[in-house]
Amino acid sequence: MGQGLPRANGQTLGGDAVALLDRLQGSSASGGTVGSSTPAKPSPVNASRFLMQSSFGPTPGSIDEVRELGYAGWIDHQLTLPASLHQPYIKEIKADAAGPRIDKSYNLNTLDNFVHGNNITTPFARNAIAGEDQLRQRVAFALSQILVVSRRNADLEEKTEAITNYYDVLVKNALGNYGDLLREVTFHPSMGMYLSHAGNQKADPSIPRYPD
């Protein structure tokens, strides 16, 4: 049985009552008990719930961090962290694939010496699981569900650098100005290929020709 919790009336709560209070503590905006304006550490349960919404899931370490810093403090700290990017990983494995450790005599198709599209999932998983900038990564993922570019488009299927470069635009702008992000997305080649406006010629009503 856990340690008892003394009350103002001299009684001591214990057992299930203490466990229930531990679950409730941290439910208010201040991190304190519901109905109280007194700041307090979020409970492990509420810290975990917060991390489920603001990261790719809680860990013992991140729960302790939220409890120590508080909700606002944790967010402020996340804003100071550098962005974990995706394209550098693709460039690295491309260089490795073309390097001396690859015996190209095993490759029967000389046109097949490239990094396949499935490889873009690896840097995503790495950053989602181990990236320090969890808030940025989670927001970037949410933005990718709104500002969609997909390798299911035949023009982008195997363009791993194009896809990861686009995703890094979301990562870099995830905690910034949404208008700036929209501008970068609009002019990104990957979005142009996905929406078919890449390479549009200037409008000429006399032909008539109108860009997408």
Image: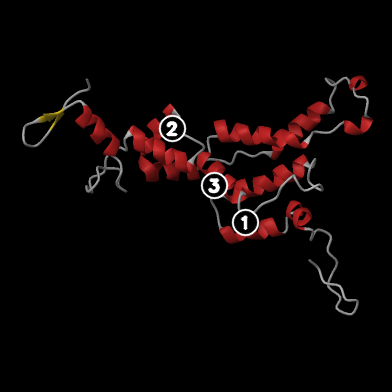
The residue to which callout 2 is attached is: 62
Badge nearest the viewer, 3 or 1? 3
- Which of marks 1 and 3 precedes in the sequence? 3
* Position of the N terminus by quadrant: top left
Task: Left or right? Give the position of 61 relative to 8.
Answer: right
The image shows residue 12, relative to residue 154, as above or below, that is: above
Report crowding for label 2: few under 14, some 14 to 19, many 20 or more residues within 10 A (C-alpha). Answer: some
Residue drawn at the location 38% of the way across and 31% of the way down = 64
> How is the rendered protein coloured?
secondary structure
User: Can you say which quadrant of the picture contains the C terminus?
Assistant: bottom right
Task: Decide which of 191, 176 is in the foreground and name it.
Answer: 191
Residue 193 screen position, x and y as percent: 78, 54
Describe the element under mark 1 as helix, strand or loop.
Answer: helix
Query: Mark 3 or mark 2: which comes first in sequence?
Result: 2
Q: Which residue lies furthest to the bottom in this view?
A: 206
Task: Give the residue displayed 57% in from the left and 50% down from the top.
Answer: 174
Q: In which quarter of the image is residue 141?
A: top right
**Residue 117 spot, x, y in % from top left:** 76, 37
Question: Mark 3 to mark 2: distance in Å?
Answer: 17 Å
Is the residue 181 above or below the residue 134 in the image? below
**Image spot of residue 182 (x, y percent):** 63, 59
Q: Is mark 2 on a helix, strand or loop?
A: helix
Q: Nearer the viewer, residue 152 or 181?
A: 152
Contact (Cβ within 8 Å) of mark 3 with mark 2: no
Identify residue for label 3: 139
Sequence-first disc among 2 and 1: 2
Q: Mark 1 points at which residue?
A: 181
In the foreground, 44 or 89: 44
